[in-house]
């Protein structure tokens, strides 16, 4: 994960990433900042996920998606399978622990910029 963030920071010099817990992710989303969410599921976990969503997709172990919203009872995650999938491309989970695999906890990364690192053009945009 850190390699992906490091590469992104080279392309977008002012872009920063910070690992946060669920509450930090909720606060970031409520302040309109993007949050990356990563999780792992077993093959049977992906099969169950597919049944629940009534769709089939190739087996994978890990996913990196965006958390786009939250309310007191759930988190909203934007999937990468397109807008026709589930709820306009998003799904809700009551607990992030539903998307964890044994020793691979779900992780959240707050994506942000510091005004002091922005160029004049970026500040005007």
Image (cartoon, helix red, strand yellow):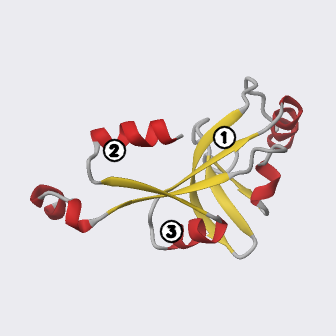
The answer for how far apart the CA atoms under marks 2 and 1 are is 31 Å
Residue nearest the viewer, comparing 97 with 94 = 97
Residue 100, position as x, y percentages in the image? 78, 48
Instruction: Quadrant for residue 61, please give it.
Output: top right
Query: Please, what secondary structure does the residue beneath circle 3 have?
Result: helix
Residue tagged 2: 9
Instruction: Tell me whether the residue at label 2 lies in contact with that at label 1, contact meaning CB atoms closer than 8 angstroms.
Output: no
Residue 84 makes an appearance in the image: no
Which residue is outermost to the bottom? Answer: 72
Eye-nearest disc, 2 or 1: 2
Residue at x 58% of width, y 37% of height: 82
Q: Earlier in the sequence, mark 2 or mark 1?
A: 2
The answer for how far apart the CA atoms under marks 3 and 1 are is 25 Å
Left/right placement of residue 111 relative to residue 22 reads: left
Asked if residue 96 is positioned above or below residue 3 in the image, the reply reads below
Eye-nearest disc, 3 or 2: 2
Residue nearest the viewer, comparing 7 with 77 = 7
Q: Which of marks 3 and 2 is nearer the N terminus?
A: 2
Residue nearest the viewer, comparing 92 with 17 = 17
Crowd band around label 2 with a 10 angstrom C-alpha radius: few (<14), some (14–19), many (20+): some
Residue tagged 1: 85
Residue at x 73% of width, y 66% of height: 74
Instruction: Quadrant for residue 32, please give it.
Output: bottom left
Which residue is outermost to the top? Answer: 58
Residue 57, position as x, y percentages in the image? 73, 27
The quadrant the C terminus occupies is bottom left
Residue tagged 3: 28
Crowd band around label 1 with a 10 angstrom C-alpha radius: few (<14), some (14–19), many (20+): some
Crowd band around label 3 with a 10 angstrom C-alpha radius: few (<14), some (14–19), many (20+): many
Residue at x 18% of width, y 57% of height: 122
Residue 28 makes an appearance in the image: yes
């Amino acid at each position: 994960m850190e390699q992906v963030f490091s590469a992104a920071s080279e392309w977008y010099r002012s872009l920063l990433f910070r690992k946060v817990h669920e509450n930090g992710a909720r606060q970031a989303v409520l302040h309109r900042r993007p949050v990356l969410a990563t999780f792992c599921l077993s093959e049977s976990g992906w099969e169950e996920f597919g049944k629940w969503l009534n769709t089939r997709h190739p087996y994978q172990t890990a996913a990196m998606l965006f958390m786009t919203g939250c309310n007191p009872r759930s988190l909203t995650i934007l999937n990468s399978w397109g807008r026709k999938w589930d709820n306009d491309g998003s799904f809700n989970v009551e607990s992030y622990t539903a998307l964890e695999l044994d020793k691979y906890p779900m992780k959240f990364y707050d994506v942000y910029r510091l005004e002091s690192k922005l160029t004049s053009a970026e500040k005007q945009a």
